[in-house]
Image (tube, rainbow, N blue to C red):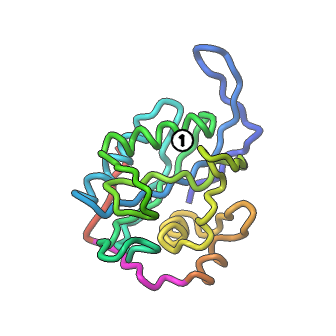
Amino acid sequence: MTETPNPHIIDADTLTGEMRPIRRVVIALGSNLGESLASLQGAVDAIADTPDVWVTGVSPVYETEPVDSPPGAQNYLNAVLLADTTLAANRLMDRALAVEDAYDRERSDVHNAPRTLDVDLIVVGDRRSDTDALRLPHPRAHERAFVLKPWYDLEPDAELPGHGPIAELLAKTGVEGLTLREDLTLDVE
């Protein structure tokens, strides 16, 4: 388990001298099209290569049944990544979208359509946002076992702001439809 950074600890930008707090980030990863494990590993690598982002943990990989997806959607591979960052939440969101685009993520009007890669910001410190471009904390994370269980594996005492301890949320959602894939792992370089 890693310790959540104190938001009052400040890191100075080396170019501008701007002072920014270090925030804990929870990022959910998912894929059910193409080479899903390779896409998840690519997302971990890309996030780890992002300036001012320090990956501190990656969960086990779970195979999960699609939730609210079109009929015939394949199972997903899901994982959660923990990081510390001094980036602003909107800049981190821009990076998440760029990583998805690098893996040919297609966006459609079909709700929860299959995808090559999904990179969702679940929590960025104590930041709150409710805009079309960024919702924090993620509005459905509290009801998604494929987010809660991998996160719980990394930080069983974590809390989802506005919803409470993830252990309690996970007890409510249950883990039906999730299968731990011990044969699949993601590495942080």
Q: Name the residue under label 1.
A: 93
Quadrant location, the N terminus: bottom right
Quadrant location, the C terminus: top left
Which residue is at the front of the view, 119 or 8?
A: 119
Would residue 176 be found to the left or right of residue 183 on screen?
right
Which residue is at the front of the view, 127 or 74?
A: 74
Query: Residue at 45% across / 42% down in the picture?
Result: 97
Q: Where is residue 100 in the image (x, y as percent from the top left)?
A: 38, 45
Name the image quarter holding residue 165: bottom right
State the SS at label 1: helix
Would residue 9 be found to the left or right of residue 153 on screen?
right
Magenta span: helix, strand or loop, mainly? loop
Q: Where is residue 178 in the image (x, y as percent from the top left)?
A: 41, 79
Name the image quarter holding residue 20: top right
Q: Is residue 49 above or below residue 136?
A: above
Q: Position of residue 25 (x, y in %)?
A: 58, 49
Amino acid type of the residue that numbered disc 1 sits on in the rendered structure: Met
Query: Residue at 66% across / 56% down in the picture?
Result: 137
Residue 84 in the magenta stretch? The answer is no
Would residue 75 be found to the left or right of residue 174 on screen?
left
